[in-house]
Image: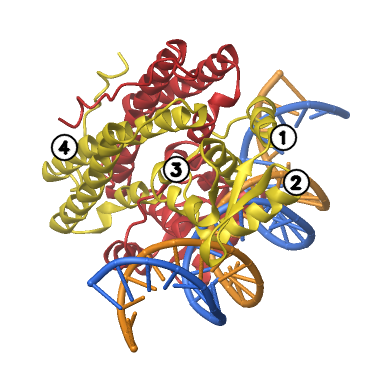
Chain colours: A red, B yellow, C blue, D orange
Amino acid sequence: MSLRYALLDLLAGDPMSGYDLTGRFTVSLANVWPAQHSQIYPELARLVQDGLIVQTGEGPRGRKVYSITPAGVDAITAWLRETEPDYTIRAESLLRIFCLWALPTDEALAHLAHDRGEFTRHRDELATMIEKVDWGDNLSRRGARLSIEFGHRYYCELVEYVDWAAAQIEAGALRAGGPVPAPTLKRTL
Amino acid sequence: MSLRYALLDLLAGDPMSGYDLTGRFTVSLANVWPAQHSQIYPELARLVQDGLIVQTGEGPRGRKVYSITPAGVDAITAWLRETEPDYTIRAESLLRIFCLWALPTDEALAHLAHDRGEFTRHRDELATMIEKVDWGDNLSRRGARLSIEFGHRYYCELVEYVDWAAAQIEAGALRAGGPVPAPTLKRTL
DNA sequence: CTATACATGTAACAAGTTACATGATTAA
DNA sequence: TTAATCATGTAACTTGTTACATGTATAG
């Protein structure tokens, strides 16, 4: 059901089309809940059926613009109030780091270097967005600002982390008899 | 296919049963790729069929202990080498923060306080694990240590982040006309 | 005129969740 | 003896991905 609320949230920010929504899922929301157009269009049809959104405009090439309804806003509120958050995360790129012992040291380091490039790219994109976008007075857009901030912090952390992991591997963490990574617990204490 | 490699990785660390694996998915791997037993048992059967693991022991109550084969290790290596990482993440709890504008300020803050409790709990569990577990000389277990480190950093970051988000909301970030959260870009610069 | 971006949709499949179903061992 | 934990599995359903399918407007 998460996709449903992600769509409602975006439509609360601005009325827009399925195509526009798909675009948003590749920027702001990509950092918390990715989705493709093939999933978005059917869900929009269901949201219309349930009265949580309405079509309020049209454009060239069959473009349909949707807006959230008061019932749609209530649906978000009810979701936040009545369901338990799912605190799990899924990150394939981190599962891969988990498995890096299966590569020779130089290849493992190259893999991390590649990851680092991706993470800095995401980080810098978000930094630009924080600076350049007008966050305005719309409540939902202000919510988006909070989320972007998280994405930015997350990628900053990832960059620091891969640097740490690379240093560990260079120091022999993935060789038998090499140094076992020491606890680094400053942050909790 | 991620589940498959997560299972292979864990079996590279120690031979174990589906039940044991399920347990690991609620601790170390829970931070990157959660899974339930209903998904694990059928996948183990497929891994046996493909020759990537073998049953090497049994125990009471029909317990079956599996070990990774050389072909299984090669499968991990090939996965790392031949497939592009998926850098997307999924975090429902963050999508909820995105939507917090749909609650009155006091409720939004209560929601964040609840989140903070979860995040500190996870953080402290991981800190304990880093200190207490013997990370030994097994390469795969050393890989797990790298992953646990990430989980720990991630939850530290989340705690800091919810504190920031709560401060923003208290300062009126989710009220029209209130202060728009200012860019906090120190970390990139 | 032609490539690119815009724009919407469906179908087949893979992955993941929840619920169902069963039974053995152990500790209180 | 009874509750909790160990232990494995399947079935029905939901969610998410990849590929297919189509057509319009715009910029060079």
Q: Residues within 10 Å of mark 4 (few under 14, many from 20)?
A: some
Q: Earlier in the sequence, mark 3 or mark 2?
A: 3
Q: Are marks 2 and 1 in contact (CB under 8 Å)?
A: yes
Looking at numbered disc 3 in the image, what kind of residue is underneath it?
Leu
Foreground mark, 1 or 3?
1
Q: Which residue is mark 4?
A: B179
Q: Are marks 1 and 4 in contact (CB under 8 Å)?
A: no
| Residue B89 position within the rendered picture, expressed as x and y whole percent measured from the top left | 47, 40
Q: Chain of mark 3?
A: B
Please tell me whether mark 1 sits on a helix, a strand or a loop.
helix
Q: Residues within 10 Å of mark 2 (few under 14, many from 20)?
A: few
Q: Which residue is mark 2?
A: B50
Please tell me whether mark 2 sits on a helix, a strand or a loop.
loop
Among the 4 quarters of the image, the one containing residue B62: bottom right
Foreground mark, 1 or 4?
1
Residue A58 seen by the camera: no
Q: Is residue D19 left or right of residue B31?
A: right
Q: Nearer the viewer, residue A126 or B135?
A: B135
Q: Which residue is mark 1?
A: B71
Task: For marks 3 and 4, give the CA distance.
Answer: 40 Å
Q: Earlier in the sequence, mark 2 or mark 1?
A: 2
| Residue A8 position within the rendered picture, expressed as x and y whole percent measured from the top left | 41, 57
Asked if A87 appears above or below A156 in the picture, the reply is: below
Q: Chain of mark 1?
A: B
Foreground mark, 3 or 4?
3
Task: For marks 1 and 3, give the CA distance.
Answer: 22 Å
Q: Which residue is mark 3?
A: B29
